[in-house]
Image (tube, grey):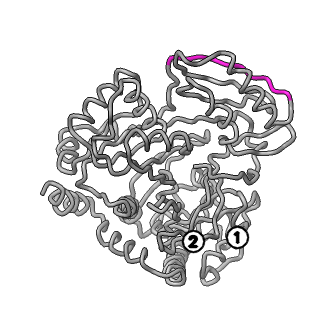
Amino acid sequence: MRRWLAWNVAFRLQEWAKGHETFRQLREMEAADRLSAEGLQELQARRLQALVCSCYQHVPYIRQRMDKAGVRPEQIRTAADLAQLPVFTKADFREHRADLRSDQATRLSQFTTGGSTGEPLIFDLGRRRVASRVACRQRVARWWGVSVGNREIALWGSPIEVTRQDWIRRARDRMLRTRLLSAFEMSASTITQYLDFFEANGCDQMFGYPSALYLFCLQANREKRDLRRCGVKVVFVTGEVLFPHQRAFISETLDCPVADGYGGRDSGFIAHECPSGGMHILSDVVIAEIVDPSGRPIAAGEAGQIVITDLFSEEAPFIRYATGDYGVASSRRCACGRALPLLERIEGRSNDLVITPDGRVINSLALVYPLRGIDGIEQYRIVQKALDTFHVQLTCSRTFDRLSEERIRAGWQQLFRAPLHITFEYLFRIPPDPRGKFRHIVSELSAGHAVAPAAHNGRGQ
């Protein structure tokens, strides 16, 4: 009964009060899940044409950029036609924010990114786009058999969510059966309190950063708590690259699958994993292109920058927006039967990729492999200071052997094919960034070094 009331009363009233068409959008999205590939392409094309026409008429900066490129709205018929338009960068949005608002926009909300690329961004979202994000999350949750009303614990770190804990918010969360736990402070004592709450109240679904959930499970393992009996059906992770060892450990500790999601505050809800393992691009909502450094689309199987066009962003458009992430598209179909296209893997941020002295750009996962087989490593952060210089921060248990430093050096020097200068620092705890995210791999090299990454075998999720 509580679940029914949460979904049919509390959640509907919340979205209605915000002026969001969330439930109508959700119905349309679930209908799109049943379409053929051809039907999806037709739906996407109709929405793209409507978006481009609206933006050309009502958004000054879009009209200016299209005129400069010599492109008329009627020339953009399908996703392939977007290549005629320039890629929009964070700098473009920062400089032209006012001119990127539609003259028909009714009520825009201001949002910010955390600046994990070194480029924080203030941007606007219309109510329709905000509603689409909420609907997307419920859409993929229902793929996994849960929704609003199933008991949820979120380990999250955004200041917006963490600081608005007034009585209205607390009452709403009780009705929706969700509890927010801050990922800002993940000390052993704090996590112990989280574990006490988890075991006392039960949980059907968890949501959060992979690093925060990994630490949660690590502490449970230290305290010899059996979380498998708590009945968690699925763990949703997003906001960071999910490494294989994190997925395996979280899944084993909670005895449930881990579902990976990809998106961002600015780029929106882009792709999500289904129970069959496919990372589906939500192509009825967003167009995700994989492009080379000049902005030209590249073939499936090749790594490039991810550029998105949000089909629900007509009030403050994101058209060919450079996310700062790199990824690889797939040409295969998922066993689940959905025609939504797939991402093969996500390589990470441009400054999370590692550059070798001979100019190769490699997936951060390649650096992680030598650490995975070393007993006692609980947390790590790898910082590339120069092409041949790394600083490694480690949090370790008593079983860690300092002689393992040589194993790491040997593994990396074989990978880099060159001598490396590697320093190690041992910390009691490695803190997350100001928004609670944890970046395992950080490159301090200038943006001029960054190029599209080389393809890497194995999924980087």
Residue drawn at (76%, 52%), measured in percent from left and top? Answer: 454
**Magenta-tinted stretch:** 419-428
Q: In this view, does 320 lie to the left or right of 206?
A: right
Classify 185 as above or below 61. above
Where is residue 291 shown, x and y percent of the image?
70, 62
Between marks 1 and 2 in the image, the one whose residue lies nearer the viewer? 2
Q: Which amino acid does label 1 sit on?
A: Lys
Tag 2, which secondary structure?
loop
Tag 1, which secondary structure?
helix
* Residue position for label 2: 333
Where is residue 9 shown, x and y percent of the image?
16, 61
Classify 56 as above or below 329. below
Q: Which amino acid does label 2 sit on?
A: Arg
First in residue order: circle 1 vs circle 2: 1
Q: Is residue 70 left or right of residue 186?
A: right
How packed is label 1: few (under 14 Cα within 10 Å), some, or many (20 or more)?
A: few
Residue 173 lies in the magenta-colored region: no
Residue 375 in sight here: yes
Pick the residue in front: 236 or 122.
Answer: 236
* Residue position for label 1: 68
Q: Residue furthest left?
A: 1
Classify 293 as above or below 195. below
Whether pointer 1 and pointer 2 mark residues with C-beta atoms closer than 8 Å, the reply is no
Pick the residue in front: 10 or 230.
Answer: 230
Q: Which disc is residue 414 wearing?
A: none
State the CA–CA distance, disc 1 to disc 2. Answer: 38 Å
How packed is label 2: few (under 14 Cα within 10 Å), some, or many (20 or more)?
A: some
Residue drawn at (26%, 37%), measured in percent from left and top? Answer: 165
